[in-house]
Image: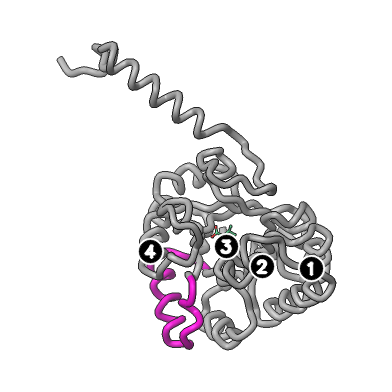
Amino acid sequence: MNAVHEFARFKAEGRKISLVTAYDAWSARIVARSNVDAILVGDSAAMVIHGHPTTLAATVGLMAMHTRAVARAAGGKFVIADLPFLSFRKGIPAAMRAVGALVTSGAHAVKLEGVDGHEDVIRHIIGSGIPVMGHLGLTPQSVNRFGGFRVQGRAARDAATLLGQAHALEGLGCFSIVLECVPADLAARITAELSIPTIGIGAGCGTDGQVLVLQDLCGLDTSMSPRYVRRYCDGERLLTDALNQYDADVKQATFPGPEESYS
Ligand code: KIV
């Protein structure tokens, strides 16, 4: 799948787009067998996989490592990788080194947060032939400026700013925009005004698609429970039950049995 063309077609046809995060080959292989449209190697890896409280700890090296693992197992899925904190704010040469590291690791596109102050960088990346996904609203790399993980765009002035930023990203040539934690009516308005697809997370169902963190939707990480997450299975319970059954079998010497042993 080429998301740049397909995403545009899906929007034109009114077909919703599904994205999910993956950070490793094991989970990418599972996503590859699913109907989900594309994979995001999110810098949320810093939190979900490495246990940091925010995404600020993600580095280009870390994102490249996760992107390589995902790309090896992603099958034909389109892989988008996050440009981590500050990697695109140190001038065009540094930004292009970061982009190069992600693309040579197997990303088909990169995602970056915000627009103000890095318009030239976005233009340069796209001009170099690399598709860029924008990210507006609650951009987690700005969590300290926001004073926490808070819904963005509730006040009329903030909503107008977000709308303007979305138009700016479209004008710069982004192929899609993630809208994170913005009121549903604002996300629907942005979606209606843009010709490029919007992908929501905590932005209601009026966007062109949705993205969730795999561990959230599978109930594999219950340490945070944002309102916007829907759990499709109780992964933590399934794994805990399996581990406890394994522990009991080991302690009762019923594992391994003859079928799991060599003669
Ligand atoms: O890092 C991430 O997982 C993301 C999504 C939640 C949009 O940016």
Spatial CA distance of label 4 from label 3 is 25 Å
Which residue is at 45% across, 24% downward? 241
Q: Give yes or no for contact between labels 1 and 2 (Cβ–Cβ under 8 Å).
A: yes
Residue at image mark 1: 190
Q: Amino acid at mark 1?
A: Ile
Q: Amino acid at mark 3?
A: Asn
Residue at image mark 4: 62
Asked which quadrant contains residue 160, the reply is bottom right
Q: Nearer the viewer, mark 4 or mark 3?
A: 4
**Which of the two discs, 1 and 2, labels the residue nearer the N terminus?**
2
- Mark 1 neighbour class, 10 Å CA radius: few under 14, some 14 to 19, many 20 or more: many
Q: Nearer the viewer, mark 3 or mark 1?
A: 1
Q: Quadrant of the C terminus?
A: top left
Spatial CA distance of label 1 from label 2 is 10 Å
Spatial CA distance of label 3 from label 1 is 24 Å
Q: Amino acid at mark 4?
A: Leu
Q: Specify whether 5 is left or right of 257.
A: right
Q: Position of residue 79 (x, y in %)?
A: 50, 60
